[in-house]
Each structure stands twice: as C-alpha cells, then as structure tokens.
Image (cartoon, rainbow, N blue to C red):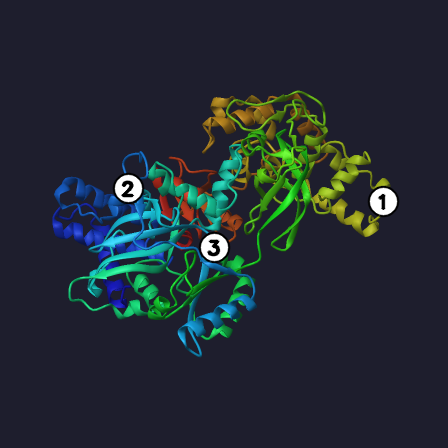
Amino acid sequence: MYATSQIKELQQITTQYLKHLGKYETDKLAIQKLIAIIRFHEYRYYLISDPLITDYEFDLLFKALQQLEKENPGLIIPDSPTQRVAGSLTKDFPSQQHLVPMLSLDNSYNADALLDFDRKARELAGKKEVVYCVEPKFDGASISLVYENDLLVRGITRGNGITGDNITPNIRQIRSIPLSANFSAKGIEMIEIRGEVLINKNNFKNYNEQLMEQGFAPLANPRNAASGTLRIKDPSEVRRRNLEVFLYNVSYFTTTEGAPEPEELLHHSSSLDLLYANGFRIPINEKKVFSGIKGVIDYCIEFEKTRDELPYEIDGMVIKVNDVELQDTLGMTAHHPRWAIAFKFKARQATSKLLKVEFQVGRTGSITPVAKIEPAPIGGITITSVSLFNADVIREKDLRIGDTVLVERAGDVIPYIVKPLTELRTGEEQPIIFPTHCPVCKDELYKPEEEAAWRCTNINCEAQVLERIIHFVSKNAMDIRGLGDANIRKFYALGLLQTIPSIYRLNYEKLSVLEGFGTKSIDKLKSAIEISKSQPLNRLIFALGIRHVGETTAKVLAHEVNHLLDFKEFTIEKLQAFEDIGPKVASSIFQFFDNKDNIQMLKELEDLGLSLQNEKKTHVTDGNLQGLTFLFTGTLSNLKRSEAESLVEQHGGKIVSGVSSKLSYLVAGEEAGSKLEKAKKTGSVKIISESDFLRMVKK
C-alpha cells in the first residue's frame, strides 16, 4: 500500500510532528497532514502488525487531531480517524438488504469430496483444468461492507442471507476496517465486500479470564464473542473488545460512467490484492493459487496440521474458482455457489450425555459444579468432565441430568457445554439441585451479593486444605518438585500430610514403604523441600493463596514490610495506600492476617525454618529507572516476563500489578489485551514496546 519512499517521508513527518506537537497552524493543510500520518500508522499497526511508533506516541497524534478538529469543526471530514468513535448508544439496528445474497458454502470433509467438486466444475466449464484460490475459513461473524464514492456507508450482518442488521456504528469501531478507500482510482463508484469479524485467541482468553474472575461463565468460543460484540448497543464497548476483520470477497461493484471494469476484479485472488492495496486486511500470507485440484488437496491437508499456530480460530479452508467470469458461468443453487466449497477440518464439537454433576470446592471455598459426561472425542482429546462454573449457568442453560448436550472445545480453550438438545428430551431428565451446604465439610454455603459463586466459609474444610497445599507447592509458588497433585492427595489420604506446615514434617520412613518412593526419589523430595525454605518472601506470600493476590501483588506486599507478620497491624486503609492495591484486594489481605489460624500457621512455618523476613536486596537508588513504575502485558519477544521485571528492579524501578494513575509505563508485547486498552483510556500511562523498554534500560 505504501512505497518505500512514502514510508520514509511519512515517518519523517511523524517525527517532526511529535517534536512540535501543538505548534502547527490550525488550518486545513495541517489537519490533512495529520490525518495522513495517523492513517499510515493505523495501517502499520492493524493491517501488517509492524508499528513504527509507540502506542503512546500514536495517542498523542490522535489527541492532537481531535484538538485541531475541535477548533475547526468545519474542517472535519467523514472518514477522519476521529469519526470512528460514536458518542451515544445505538437504540436499535434497522434491517438492510444485501446488494447480493450472502449464500452458505457447500461443505466437504475429505479429498474425495474435493475431487468430485473439481470434476463438476470442469464439466460445467468445459475445461480440462480449473485454477483455484484457497484461503482459510475464519470462524467468526460474517459481515458485508458497502463503500460509495470511496466512503464506508454501511456495515451489515449476514442475517438470513438476504437481509441483515445495519450495524454501521459498531463496524466503524473496528480499526482494521478503513473508513475510506481509493476505489475511484480504479473507476469503482460502489463496491460491496464480504468479510469475517474475529477476536484473536489471546484477546478472547483475556476477556474470558476477566469474566471468570468476576464469577461469570466464559463465552464458548471466539466466534460467539465476535458475533455477540457486533450487536452490543454501546459502540465504545465494541471498541474495547479489540475486534478484527479479514475481507474475503468482492460480491458486487459498479463503475463510473465510461470507466472500464478493473482488471484486478477479473480474478478472485487479484481482487483480494486490490483490497489489500487499499488498506483492507486479507489472508495475504495464507491465500494460494493452484492450477488443478491436487495442489489444493495437499495444501488443505497440510494446513490443518498447523491450524493452531494461527492467532485466530479457523475451521477449514475455502476453495474458490479464481476466474470471476467462470464463476458466473458455474452459477449457484438456491443454497450455495457452485464455484466455491469449504473443506472442513475435524470437528471440535461433539454431542454427549450429561451423566451427573459433582460439586468441587476450591482453595478459596468457591463451589464449582462439574458435569460428568459420556466420553466425547474432540480435537484429538477425549472429554469426560466439563466445568459448569456456577449455579446461574445451570439455570440459564436449563441443564438437566440425562440431557444430550453439545460440547465444544476451541483451540486451547477449556471444554464448554454450549447447550442441551432439548428436542431430544424423553421426560426422564432430572433437574440439577445446587447444594445448600458444602459437599465436603457440610457447613452452610454463603453467596456474597456481588459474586456469582457460592462459597464454603470454613477454612478448615478438607477440600480447601488440600487445594491450598497443592497451590503452596506449585511451580510459581514454593516450587517443591516431587509433590504434585496426585502425591499430595495420596499423602493426605494416608495421613502423611494434614496442613501446609506438615510438608516440612514429612515422615520419610513411612514414605519409603510406598510404591515408587525409593532412596533416590526420597532424597530428591527432601532436597526440594529444604530448598523451598529459602524462597524469597514474595514467593511465600503468593504461595499462601490469599484471595486476589497474584504474583505481582505479592511482590508489592513483600517490599512493604520487614517481616511478614507486620501485616497483622495493617488496616485496610493502610493496605490501600500501597502501589495499585484497591479495596477488594486490601480487604482480602486484611481478612487473612486477621485470622488467628493463619497467624498460627505462619509462626509454625517460621519455626520449621522458613524465613518470614524480607531479605531485601540493597535498593538501587541511582538507577536510570529510579522513581518509575512498570507493568508488562502480552507476549515479549526477547525476554521472559520474570527477566524483564528483574531488569526493572535492578535499575531502580518498581513493578506494579495493574493499570492505574500510579503506573509510569505499560510495556506491551504481542497480542496485549485488556491492560493495554485500560492504559489507553487513562491517558496518563505511557505505552511502550519491548524494544523501547530495552533502550531505556541500556541508557
């Protein structure tokens, strides 16, 4: 889209503008120049994922444009980057007819079906060989975009294929959809383009984690997340969900009077290249053109093996006759075009029978219903247990014992019951009764008003004790190798483990008579337990499993005391004064140290040789990051997260646990999610890349 000379020129203009921000004349030329460089950097970030400036610098440019337009409202143009942002809720989505019906695709599941498709295409075309274009079949929500006189005028959902919902205000929030495109350079007056709206796996995972932290059931798959987001009535919320779109077809166009039909639109593959050249996202690296069906079949089979390497969910490949004139010759049925077919990958859904529901108790006392189902093979693994998350999910889905259920597993997402197949009910299905008392200790359950989960409040509940021990020894906590989940449960059942302190009083003589515990195994376990005594204070704090206290918050807490038991004297207000600790976290910490049993446990651990002292390293007071706070999000390319955080501390900076006004820099790696969006909204947090961070350290 941009020549090398243009890239250099636009980057030079960007540098000049950032140096002299706010000092330009507020005239039409200044606004046009600023719009041009913002569009360029949107292209670099959203289309080719290769930004040339930091998010913070981009935000400065965007705010400068907003200010110029505020001072000169008469110079605002419809496709200005600022015009994406909608200012009010959408009351409803009016129906809109597609210019060309959006038909379904015929499906194939093996090579024989593709050979048959090719045979029919060759027979209808009267050709010995047909040229095909192959591209991924993205698993998202289909949309139709219409541009008139180079401007985006509407975005429509698929609907029933003939008519969809006009969701233009929400479509404008998707940064990978240009608000304008230079189609007129090719003589195109109107064009309708088909595409698929997606949410990438990392953003989907982050969003689901947020839902589960709040006690809500996660969304079943990225497709549902994308489809549901498109129909949200608050466009600003749509913007926060980080939707993306891939365009896959030009379905209709008209040219200006006297203009010839653009050559690029004579073939499907070149029409996608035309879209790409105009700033649209297409599967540029994945689409391939083949003469004959053999290459198509080989490509589809090979692609299925690497499908999980893509950052998006795909459920197959789409094969299209590349010659558009030949497409018209082949025509279509009432259901699907004869010139295209989908090669579907192995199913990641299956039906099963819901046999029973078990209620499990977590280390914080939360009660999780778990469905036990008949074995269901999905995506290479066999599913027998599926979390139902909470009582609300059971009620909302109207699940019953004996139901035939649809089970799904998308990518690395946990298995999920999509719905019961109510039409298959026989009348013998039984309702699922959520317990009123803990299934383990029989104490009465309690449900806080602001949460979705019921909880057992007895901290001595056997199930909670077991889960706390398992968490205590885990890799990111005390890291005691040899004490895995299975061994802890076995030792607990045999009476060898009862509490966290009992880890350090293990009877190794009794262990030696157990199968699999020879001298070498016991020596390794002894050594791992002994080494764990010297873990730093932040590891011990995280290992205690205090609700809402993760690894980063544990580091913050460790820095604030000389001895762990100092927290006995801290009020909620004093805890909230710490870096990035809010009311909920402060209350949880206070409750933990206000509990006599917890204090007794900590004293036992100290007597057994664990250090509750803060063995603080000499704090760097002259480092080049002195006085600055950092938070890392997304995947870093060159450093592990722990290495990056260590670099901050070595150079005098601090790590915080979340985005707030106290955060100086958010270092955003690949596929950064909700923390990045929150930082953008604050306006005060500087957002930098990993390379920017490393340059700061080297200075």
Residue type, label 3: Pro
Spot occupied by residue 691 in the image (x, y as percentages of width and height): 40, 55
The image position of residue 610, as x and y in percent, is: 68, 36
Residue farthest toward the right in the current orientation of the protein: 513
Q: Measured from the top left, where is residue 450 in percent x and y? A: 50, 25
Q: Secondary structure at mark 2?
A: loop
Q: Nearer the viewer, mark 1 or mark 2?
A: 2
> Counting residues from the N terminus, which is met first, the one under dot 1 or under dot 2?
2
Question: Residue 85 bears which disc, if any?
Answer: 2
Q: Eyeballing the image, is 60 above or below 194?
A: above
Figure quadrant of residue 168: top left
The answer to whether residue 297 of the structure is visible from this angle is yes
Are the residues at dot 3 and dot 1 in contact (C-beta closer than 8 Å)? no
243 or 23, nearer to the observer: 243
Name which residue type carries label 1: Leu
Question: At 55% across and 61% down in the image, what residue appears?
Answer: 109
The residue type indicated by label 2 comes to Val
Instruction: Give the residue at mark 3.
Output: 311
Residues under numbered marks 1 and 2 in contact, where contact means CB atoms less than 8 Å apart: no
Which dot, 3 or 1, sits closer to the camera?
A: 3
Which of pointers 2 and 3 lies earlier in the amino acid sequence? 2
Q: Which residue is mark 1?
A: 514
Q: Residues within 10 Å of mark 1 (few under 14, many from 20)?
A: few
The alpha-carbon separation of the residues under discs 3 and 1 comes to 46 Å
- CA gap, disc 1 to disc 2? 66 Å
- Left or right: residue 123 versus residue 374 is left
